[in-house]
């Protein structure tokens, strides 16, 4: 009998995790779920939900996986569920627990920070008993999203909470979303680094006007204000945006590279919305920062919020930041780009803001309209003073850059809170593949047709954001509801009680009638089918975990 069983999602990580566990002295085996253990009907026309929002057709995907999970659990003294540390991973973790709880009633949940020995040891020290509450957001979101798709997708038009929100984001922009980014520079009165302002081509400043602006020699500006540069780090969405601009990678390509770097132990957990790191991560990053040769201090890095589970994605191990990320390939290019940002944030720099009022008079004298002159003069004309880093340009020139449409759309989605770190890349990739907009993010005829046939309420990205937030709530009494799982309780509250009537009415009308006594899950039935002769442990001999996390020092 082995001491520990670790349950993960991806079979490709079994060998690497097993080797690391062996290196840190754990007698352990690793078993993979191969993704989700349960699924609803593939055909969205079969909603598989009743009026109590119970998933009546949620079934096990693979009995063989259940069998081997149980087989390995019987042969282990304790079980750690180390599925991905996001909402989907929490759903898989709870499903796993339900399938083996007769063998191990006190399973531990581990949220891996990275695939290297130090990170795994740190994660183990923070292991806690698995909680049903953690699975609520993922299960609730899946129910609501499925019901939205089933109710409103018709006549060849796909409607989804996030996808339709993205469509609405473009539609409601009324031409103010563009892939053309303008950089204007003005000299400084002190003769040092110039001032820089950025904006995207829009209705006030069109492409033709922008082309004239970048040819101008703007007047010298004085400093108006100064403050320490931000020490905030990049969350996953910002990493994907930066990789699009600097490395020419789509969000999906960046997410894939970050995942590979994570699985190979060269980056921390990537799917994070945090813009800071824990003190433990900061101490691990100190060595990397020191070896770059810059006089940075890891203590300057922003600290993550107490409510945040993950650190901002960070490189593990030494990184040569002098190398050009564009020449290193996708994986190491992203890793080096992120490392540069950490080094930059660890050094004391100053952000200065220019007094730009005189630009209005200058542009008027050059024949530009009041609208253009006012818009440009009110931009943030800034510069950063401090140590320079490889690849950072001290004296930039005015110019126009055409950005990737995927990058611009992602940037907008992240800014308004549409989607999550674990889904950003997938949603952007799927949206762009549908031919709903062109390369400059103008709606195509197909896109306009989909707008006309989509519910106006779902075209408002704020509705998607509100649903996302509602799925995270824990309502009084929901854990003890009679005949309903907590995610069904919360989904019913959202659909029937919180959504606008023009959405909730049609959604509730398509649901199957609720039959009292309907089973809320099929775990026991699935165990009997997949493991025909399950052991019924003697209560005196049931395997119980002896694992105790280390006390915080």
Image (cartoon, rainbow, N blue to C red):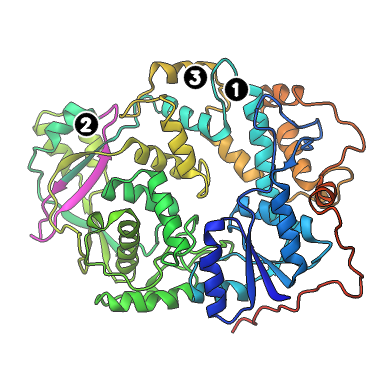
Q: Position of residue 20 (x, y in %)?
A: 52, 74
Residue that numbered label 3 is attached to: 450
Q: Which quadrant, please, contains the C terminus?
A: bottom right
Q: In the image, is 310 to the left or to the right of 467?
A: left
Residue 238 in view here: no
Q: Nearer the viewer, mark 2 or mark 1?
A: 1
Crowding near pointer 2: few (<14 within 10 Å), some, many (20+)?
A: some
The residue positioned 28% from the left and 50% from the top of the image is 247
Give the quarter of the image for residue 161: top right
Residue at horizontal 63 percent and vertical 35 percent from the top: 145
Q: Secondary structure at mark 3?
A: helix
Q: Return the residue nearer the eye: 70 or 434.
A: 70
Image coordinates for residue 412, horizontal then vertical, percent: 41, 40
Q: Main secondary structure of the magenta part?
A: loop
Q: Which mark is residue 102?
A: none
Label annotation for residue 153: 1
Which one is closest to the eye, mark 3 or mark 2?
Answer: 3
Reading the image, the residue beneath label 2 is 372
Question: CA separation, marks 3 and 2?
Answer: 34 Å
Tag 2 and tag 1, C-beta contact below 8 Å: no
């Amino acid at each position: 009998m082995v001491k520990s069983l670790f349950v993960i999602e991806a079979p490709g990580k079994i060998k690497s995790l097993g080797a690391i566990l062996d290196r840190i002295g754990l007698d352990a085996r690793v078993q993979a779920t191969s993704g989700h253990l349960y699924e609803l009907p593939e055909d969205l026309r079969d909603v598989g939900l009743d009026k109590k929002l119970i998933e009546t057709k949620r079934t096990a995907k693979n009995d063989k996986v259940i069998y081997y999970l149980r087989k390995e659990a019987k042969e282990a003294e304790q079980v750690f569920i180390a599925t991905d540390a996001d909402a989907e991973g929490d759903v898989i973790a709870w499903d796993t627990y339900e399938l083996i709880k007769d063998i191990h009633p006190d399973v531990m949940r581990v949220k891996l920070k990275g695939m290297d020995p130090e990170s795994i040891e740190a994660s183990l020290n923070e292991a806690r008993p698995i909680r049903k509450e953690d699975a609520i957001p993922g299960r609730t979101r899946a129910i609501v999203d499925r019901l939205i798709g089933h109710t409103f997708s018709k006549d060849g038009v796909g409607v989804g909470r996030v996808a339709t929100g993205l469509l609405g984001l473009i539609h409601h922009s009324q031409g103010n979303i563009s892939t053309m980014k303008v950089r204007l520079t003005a000299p400084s009165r002190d003769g040092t680094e110039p001032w820089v302002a950025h904006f995207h081509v829009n209705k006030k400043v069109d492409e033709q006007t922008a082309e004239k602006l970048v040819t101008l020699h703007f007047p010298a500006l004085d400093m108006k204000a100064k403050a320490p540069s931000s020490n905030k780090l990049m969350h996953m969405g910002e990493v994907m945006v930066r990789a699009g601009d600097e490395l020419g990678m789509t969000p999906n390509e960046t997410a894939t590279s970050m995942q590979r770097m994570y699985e190979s132990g060269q980056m921390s957990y990537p799917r994070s919305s945090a813009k800071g790191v824990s003190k433990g991560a900061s101490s691990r990053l100190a060595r990397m920062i020191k070896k770059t040769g810059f006089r940075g201090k890891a203590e300057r890095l922003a600290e993550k919020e107490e409510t945040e589970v993950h650190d901002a994605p960070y490189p593990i191990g030494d990184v040569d930041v002098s190398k050009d990320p564009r020449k290193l390939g996708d994986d190491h290019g992203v890793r080096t780009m992120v490392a540069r940002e950490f080094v930059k944030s660890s050094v004391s720099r100053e952000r200065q803001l220019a007094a730009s009022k005189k630009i209005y008079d200058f542009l008027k004298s050059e024949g530009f309209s009041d609208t253009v002159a006012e818009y440009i003069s009110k931009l943030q004309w800034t510069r950063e003073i401090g140590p320079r880093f490889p690849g950072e340009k001290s004296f930039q020139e005015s110019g126009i850059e055409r950005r990737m449409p995927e990058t611009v759309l992602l940037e907008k989605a992240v800014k308004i809170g549409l989607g999550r770190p674990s889904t950003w890349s997938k949603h952007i990739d799927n949206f762009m593949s549908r031919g709903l907009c062109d390369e400059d993010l103008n709606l195509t005829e197909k896109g306009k047709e989909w707008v006309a046939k989509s519910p106006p309420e779902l075209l408002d990205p704020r509705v998607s954001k509100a649903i996302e937030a509602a799925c995270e709530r824990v309502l009084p009494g929901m854990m003890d509801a009679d005949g309903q799982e907590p995610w069904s309780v919360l989904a019913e509250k959202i659909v029937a009680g919180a959504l606008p009537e023009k959405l909730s009415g049609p959604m509730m009308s398509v649901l199957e009638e609720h039959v009292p006594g309907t089973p809320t899950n099929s775990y026991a039935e699935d165990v009997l089918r997949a493991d025909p002769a399950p052991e019924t442990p003697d209560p005196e001999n049931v395997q119980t975990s002896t694992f105790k996390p280390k006390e915080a020092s």
